[in-house]
Amino acid sequence: MFRSVKNWLTILILALVALAMLVAYIYVVPPLTHRLDQQKLRDQQLNAALISNTIVGSGVYYLGNGLMGVQDETGLQHTVTLLGMRFNARVVVVTDNFAKRLDSGGVDSFDVGDYPMIQRSLATGRPAQGVVTTGSGRYAATAVPLVDTSSGVVFGTVLVAASLKDVDKAVAAVQRQLLFATVLALGVSLLLGYMASYFIARRLKRIERSAEAIAGGDLTATVAVTVEDEIGQLAATFNVMAVRLRGAFAQVEYERDRVEVLLNDLSEGVIGLSEEGAVTIANPASAELLDEPVRVGAGLDETFPADVAEAWHESRREDETQAVVFVHGERTLEATTYPVAGAADFTSIVVLRDVTAQARLERARRDLIANASHEFKTPLFSLAGFLELIDEGNVNAEEQREFLQLMRQQVDRLRNLAVSMLDLSTVEAGSIEMEPADVDLETVARSVLDEFQVQAQAKDLTLTVDDGDAVTAWCDEQRLAQVLRALVDNAVKFSPRGSNVRVAAHAEASWATIVVSDDGPGIQAAELPHVFERFHRGSEERATTSGAGLGLSIARELTEMMGGSIRADSGGGASFSVRLPRAARRRAPSGDS
């Protein structure tokens, strides 16, 4: 019951009312009793003096030596009795040695020890009075000394004792009224206090329910302000707090969503580590880069290889950023560790980046330099040799013409190699601006074949475009022509005399494919996966043709830049299929078929 504000308030109100009634009782009853007793004593003092004078005038006198004399004891006894009846009091004549001489009578026996005012009166010679309590109740008693007028000797005292039952009854009546008033006040207070406490507690309960709703996540909860009192002000303040809390939570959620979107959209993996090296948070990209989910709570050694763990420890010791590159499956990853300050549950983060492309590019750069050096070396050495022979002058005119013809071939080879390398570097640098549009594949194919008619006639080749429905693709017309040139050039170069080179186009649901095929020796199965690699030239090609081996590599790069893919097949000749989207779309993965 003491856990409810309503009960507490009700009990408090009852306690206050009870305390007020107690104060009223203390303020009323004892002073009332005292005033009535004092009034009784004042009235009795006058009566006692009158009784004393009456007794002295009725024959009581001083005999000397402290003795009391009575002229007519029977008559005096009768007088004392009448005085007691008249004043409704007990009248007792006491000698100076505390002996009772005359007594009007009473309900109990007389004991001088019950009345200390007798001794004070005899000792002082002055009237003494007070309230005494005997076996039969309370009494107002007054002792008036009997003094010899000639000698001034106190030879006795007259005690007048009147019962205070009427005073006690009056006080008891007041007490009953106070008690009734107390019970009535407590009952009314209980009812009104309970009602008041109920309404106050109900208003507080509304605030409590709203607070619980906010604690449960409902930040729209408010409290109705019905009365402009302290609880109303509390409710209004609560509503202001709720509004500010909603704003604060909205800001926190906004920042959290921003961070979450940022982390989730990052291609880099971000992993938070505790001071002990345990994973506390990881974004989706980290699981994708590591090819497995990153478990929260996993240790550093479980998640990363040893060199990354060592870099993390070094970063912790030196309090600076550390980076390490490692190979994970088919990927090359770079892990960078950063110390983090703040109250988060992680003290450092590891950022994973996929540097496979950069590593591949670096390898390609080294291969390009090595292959270019090799490819340039042969024609340059040949040119140097021919020049040296011509410079010596030991060749006739016919040999000189032959040397010059060979030198032109080597210069053409160098020029073609330089142009191909320039095209490749332009593609790799991303400097080519694509201008996609709906392109008719058959029109482009016929235009490219027209460029090779001279070479085809020299080998008696037939260049044909298969007739069919018009097929369009979403691509850059100039770049598509460049791709087809590389493919047709290969086909013309490897086709035997009198054979055919065919170009055909067909469409699927969302893709268009153009195929260049020939009747040449085809491509060996072992070399088929490498035909699009830079500077790759098959054994047959190296023996029978010249070239740098960059044309197909450039064709693949351009095709992928247009959102398509290219594939080589062999069987009864070589066949190259270029697959392009029919409408604008995101770039398709390499090798999609």
Image (cartoon, grey):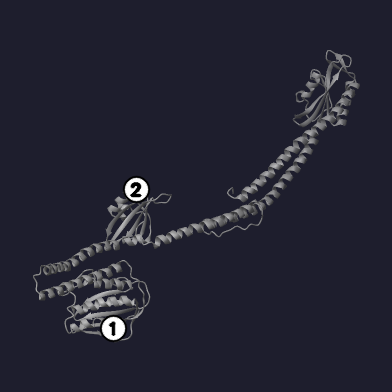
* Left or right of residue 336, residue 159 in this image: right
Farthest-out residue, right: 57
Q: Quadrant of residue 487?
A: bottom left
Q: Is residue 328 above or below residue 172?
A: below
Give the residue displayed 31% in from the left and 66% down from the top: 429
Q: Nearer the viewer, residue 254 or 57?
A: 254
Q: Quadrant of residue 390?
A: bottom left
Q: Quadrant of residue 15?
A: top right
Give the residue displayed 26% in from the left and 77% down from the top: 485
In x, y percent, where is residue 585?
37, 74
Q: Nearer the viewer, residue 306 or 397?
A: 397
* Left or right of residue 343, residue 244 in this image: right
Residue type at numbered disc 2? Arg
In x, y percent, where is residue 251?
50, 58
Label number found at residue 446: 1
Q: Nearer the viewer, residue 492 or 20?
A: 492
* Left or right of residue 581, residue 169 in this image: right
Contact? badges 2 and 1 (CB < 8 Å): no
Q: Helix, strand, or loop for circle 2?
A: helix
Mark 1 is surrounded, within 10 Å at the Cα level, by few (under 14), some (14 to 19) or many (20 or more) other residues, namely some
Residue type at numbered disc 1? Arg
Q: CA distance from mark 2 to mark 1?
A: 66 Å
Q: Nearer the viewer, mark 2 or mark 1?
A: 1
**Res. 330 in view:** no
Q: Is residue 146 above or below residue 255?
A: above
Give the residue displayed 43% in from the left and 60% down from the top: 260
Label number found at residue 316: 2
**Res. 22 in view:** yes
First in sequence: mark 2 vs mark 1: 2
Q: Is residue 142 above or below residue 245?
A: above
Mark 2 is surrounded, within 10 Å at the Cα level, by few (under 14), some (14 to 19) or many (20 or more) other residues, namely some
Q: Helix, strand, or loop for circle 1?
A: helix
